[in-house]
Image (cartoon, grey):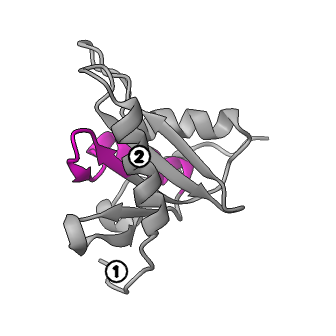
Amino acid sequence: MTTPNHHVDHELIEATADIARTRCRGDNHTMAAAARAQDGRIVTAVNAYHFTGGPCAELVLIGAAAAQGVYALETIVAVGDRDRGVVPPCGRCRQALLDYFPAIEVIVGLGDRVRTVPVTDLLPESYVWADHQLDAE
């Protein structure tokens, strides 16, 4: 596991917390996510909870980023509603983030102990989908 100290993007955390406070209402939207693109833009999203499952905020964010023409994300964070603070991505989101953005960094931790880690640190010995695809001819 990598342990170097990576810069924590507090502006990104605050932007996500603002989305969680203002856009997450009721049981349908309980998590917000934000990511910083390589060009500095911030893309935001909320989860879409449904009793059949529904996508997490991080997965909605991947689609929202593509819809805005953003295909290179550097850092992502998720924040829970009701001032729950930073929430680490679930296993499915960790795998999707690795597949879409293998160099992305993820903000994790609680309170004043948040830190930024490479997504690969969250999935040691991970399966890399792209490594198992047939080369297009």
Point out residue 45 in the picture as x, y percentages from the top left corner: 48, 36
Q: Mark 2 Cα within 10 Å, few/some/many (few <14, many 20+)?
A: some
Residue 20's image quarter? Answer: top left
Where does the N terminus fall, quadrant-wise?
A: bottom left
Tell me what residue is drawn at x 63 percent, y 42 percent.
134
Left or right: 114 in relation to 47: left
Question: Which amino acid lies under the numbered mark 1 shown in the image of this protein?
Answer: Thr
Q: In this view, does 12 lie above or below 47?
A: below
Q: Mark 1 Cα within 10 Å, few/some/many (few <14, many 20+)?
A: few
Disc 2: which residue: 18
Point out residue 9 in the picture as x, y percentages from the top left corner: 46, 69
Q: Is residue 53 above or below residue 107?
A: above
Q: Nearer the viewer, residue 109 or 100?
A: 109
Point out residue 46 in the picture as x, y percentages from the top left corner: 42, 33
Q: Does the magenta stretch include residue 118?
A: no
Disc 1: which residue: 2
Point out residue 4 in the picture as x, y percentages from the top left corner: 37, 86
Q: Nearer the viewer, residue 92 or 41?
A: 41
Residue 82's image quarter? Answer: top left
Where does the C terminus fall, quadrant-wise?
A: top right
